[in-house]
Amino acid sequence: MFGLDKKDTSKLIIVACLALLAPFILNPFPTDSALAQFNAGYPDLMQRFVIFGIFAIGFNILFGLTGYLSFGHAAFLGVGSYSAVWMFKLIGMNVIPAIVLSVIVAGLFALLIGFVSLRRSGIYFSILTLAFAQMSFNLAYSVLTPITNGETGLQLTLEDPRILGVSATTDGSIPVTNLFGLEMRSTFEMAVGPWAFQFNAGYYLCALIMLAAFYLSIRIFRSPFGMMLRAVKSNQQRMNYTGLNTRPYTLAAFVISGMYAGLAGGLMASMDPLAGAERMQWTASGEVVLMTILGGAGTLIGPVLGAGFIKYFENIFSKINDNVLHTWFSFLPDGMEDAVVFIIHPFIGKGWHLTLGILFMLVVIFLPGGLVEGGQRIKGWLSRRKAKGSNTSGETNPAE
Amino acid sequence: MGILEVKDVGKRFGGLQALSNVNLSVQENSVHAIIGPNGAGKSTLLNCLVGKLIPDTGSVMFDGQSVLGRAPYEINQMGISRVFQTPEIFGDLTVLENMMIPCFAKRDGAFELNALSSVLRQKDILQKAEHMLEEMNMADKRHMHAAAMSRGDKRRLEIGMCLSQEPRLLLLDEPTAGMARADTNNTIDLLKQISDERDITIAIIEHDMHVVFSLANRITVLAQGTPLVEDDPQNIRGNPKVREAYLGESA
């Protein structure tokens, strides 16, 4: 289907189901139950899941295929956000021109940075991209204040021209982002018994774009171009002595992944029309590296899983505080309760980074292929168990 | 006029004159061996031919065109393929994919942004790669990871990859170094077969005299960066100058 083989089609369908049914899947607990705070099915967070999914899918095209570890990809995300907000300020509140411009600008910016950085490989390449990203961050933070509005961040105002729209709505407020009239913030709430499911227009736009981005990445992985990128990772020397010029291949991969990052940035601004320099900071660049490695670099589905995993932790674990812990462990005797809460305390709330760090270490040490490898191992274990079961039932399958 | 003409090539590394006044003419469809004791400059000369090093003086002409100042991939596209001393293959890719990449390079040139069509739809490339694998007797290994193969198989694959580009000149840098006797003989047979059946020129750098005398129909002896003598194998065998260079004056 869609020019994909069976395995890839099923991957695409799985991701499509996860994305389109996310409001249900992420909301397993009734609204009033004690576990409701583990629900992630609210629009803001779901949007972040898929937007960072796009970011990680694009990053994986560069890192997963060519092995070039860019430490400056957040710069493209930030540039995309700024471009989109400028589009909202100058043209109008429709998200399509904003997203298109953010992809184009991020692509051009990636072409410039990639052209310089790809003169080196390995650690030097990483450092060059990091340096460029930090330069961009500092420029956005101070020097380029007329364009970026410095540390306040770029926001919409009532004075913006918006030549294809209105500067202000009839009731005197700033208009909201929309897709040909469909407001991005509009949410339909469906109550089923004790559950409340939220369907947000903006989320579904992001999810559909993410699916398109995922589909495109599968096509790239399976194409001759994708094979060349894997060859670059494997042996550049052989590439050069096989009549292949590695520079344009790596540059194309860099620009494509920069455009994915710009798309993510544009979507971010479309959901919430503001852009700040902190989006370009090196921690943001590091985050996408973590997502990709945690999920499984070089795999198709891994980056999406990694993005979801990290964003879930960031938003859910950071919200657990001592009061919540006390209510959970109130069944224990007083002294025990305090002791347990004391032990868990550093790992929750502001300490969620600690939990994430430990999990990341465990994954990298025991599952170097990321969450995807974990899934494969479970699958292998299950099928072996099944095979064992059928063996004992008298069949003589040759052992493999 | 040979297919490869090396004229007055010199190369200096700091205080070491690695090559000086090297003149070499490789005739089309011949097997030309370049031999010499350690440090004679064989590998330096080879690197000057493929664009890895640029000689300080002299010229290198391939088929009437200068190769100097061109990048390795450009020289390769001119028709010179190189086999390395330790096999350089794409270890993370399957054997079939390894074979497909040079086929793509031959068909599409140094760069082609073919990002949306599936590899499996490139029937002509698949066919050519499969055919080459059969010729190399590796068809049964097509889905193996290339890195998992034995050294002899890696060498075979590398030679096959070079051949699938249909080069006019095949350069081999000690292709049997570190190989067991059986593997060495297999490689000799393979190279013999290649030079008999194909319209190809082979230049080989080699230490092993057994390999050299079973393959070459022209030999250049290099010593201390300069060609000592260039002649037919039977004349080289008895040449006292060659013995001296190899074994020292006492011999």
Image (tube, rainbow, N blue to C red):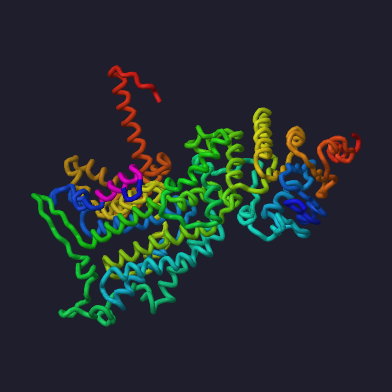
Nearer the observer, A267 or B157: B157
Q: For residue A180, which quarter of the picture? A: bottom left
Instruction: Decide whether the magenta segment is chiefly helix, strand or loop.
Output: helix
Q: Quadrant of the C terminus of chain A?
A: top left
- The magenta stretch is A5-18
**Residue drawn at x 28%, y 81% as measured from the top left:** A163
A177 versus A231 height, above or below: below
The image position of residue A152, as x and y in percent, is: 33, 73
Is A187 left, or right, of A74 in this rendering?
left
The image position of residue A215, as x and y in percent, is: 34, 53
The image position of residue B175, as x and y in percent, is: 67, 39
Is A16 in the magenta? yes
Nearer the observer, A31 or A3: A3
B119 versus A189 height, above or below: above
Instruction: Kindly give the residue lying farthest to the left in the view shown.
Output: A193
| Residue A325 appearing in the image | yes
The image position of residue A337, as x and y in percent, is: 22, 43
Nearer the observer, B108 or B93: B108
**Residue drawn at x 73%, y 43% as measured from the top left:** B30
Is A123 left, or right, of A82 in this rendering?
right
Instruction: Kindly give the residue lying farthest to the top in the view shown.
Output: A394
Is A344 left, or right, of A260 in this rendering?
left
Q: How many marks?
A: 0
Is A210 left, or right, of A73 in this rendering?
left
| Residue B98 appearing in the image | no
Is A62 in the magenta? no
